[in-house]
Amino acid sequence: MHPNEIDDDGTWKSDIHEGIELNLLGEKIPLPDNLKKESGDTHAEVLAVLNVIDVFTICPNCNSSPYGPVLMVEGGWYMYPAKCCDFMLWVKNKNEIPLDV
Ligand SMILES: [Zn+2]
């Protein structure tokens, strides 16, 4: 799953995976390896699809202006498919751990 495959409403479109087109809301998506240990699970449910500017004012990875969707994921995580820096970013919910951005 690459950032540019996820559109503004959280739909994952991939040509690689047989032309899949899947809205991720309510789906269980794979956690990155470092989060698997913390959560004790391999997948987590997408609870909401938000506009990233409501969550971050700058991209936590590259500091440019964020755009597109951010997925609120079970366990207090935001998954931001950062198209600005082509990076899948997992950030803890700001209500639990303040982001230093
Ligand atoms: Zn970025």
Image (spheres, helix red, strand yellow):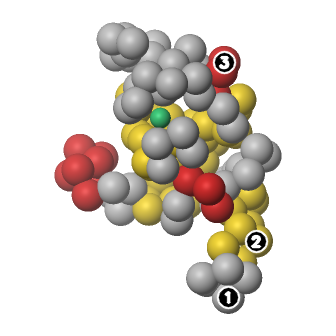
Q: Which mark is residue 21?
A: 2
Say which residue label 3 marks: 54
Tell me if residue 4 comes above or below residue 98 in the rendering: below
Q: Quadrant of the C terminus?
A: top left
Camera sees residue 63: yes
- 52, 32: nearer the viewer: 52
Q: Which type of secondary structure does the marked residue at label 1 adopt?
A: loop
Task: Choose the circle earlier in sequence order: 2 or 3.
Answer: 2
**How far from the left and from the top, in percent, is residue 54?**
66, 18
Tell me if residue 13 comes above or below residue 44 in the rendering: below
Residue occupying the point 33% across, 11% down: 100
Camera sees residue 24: no
Residue occupying the point 62% across, 56% down: 4
Q: Which type of secondary structure does the marked residue at label 3 adopt?
A: helix
Circle 1: is it few (<14), some (14-19), or many (20+) Cα within 10 Å?
few
Say what amino acid the circle numbered 1 marks. Answer: Glu
What is the quadrant of residue 60 in the picture? top left
Cα separation between marks 1 and 3:
33 Å
Say what amino acid the circle numbered 3 marks. Answer: Asp
What is the quadrant of residue 99 in the picture? top left
Cα separation between marks 2 and 1:
9 Å
Q: Are marks 1 and 3 in contact (CB under 8 Å)?
A: no
Q: Which mark is residue 69?
A: none
What is the quadrant of residue 24 in the picture? bottom right
Label 3 within 8 A of ligand 1 by Cβ = no
Left/right of residue 92 with respect to residue 5 in the rendered view? left
The mark tally for this picture is 3
Label 2 within 8 A of ligand 1 by Cβ = no
Task: Choose the circle earlier in sequence order: 1 or 3.
Answer: 1
Q: Which mark is residue 18?
A: 1
Residue occupying the point 76% across, 44% down: 8
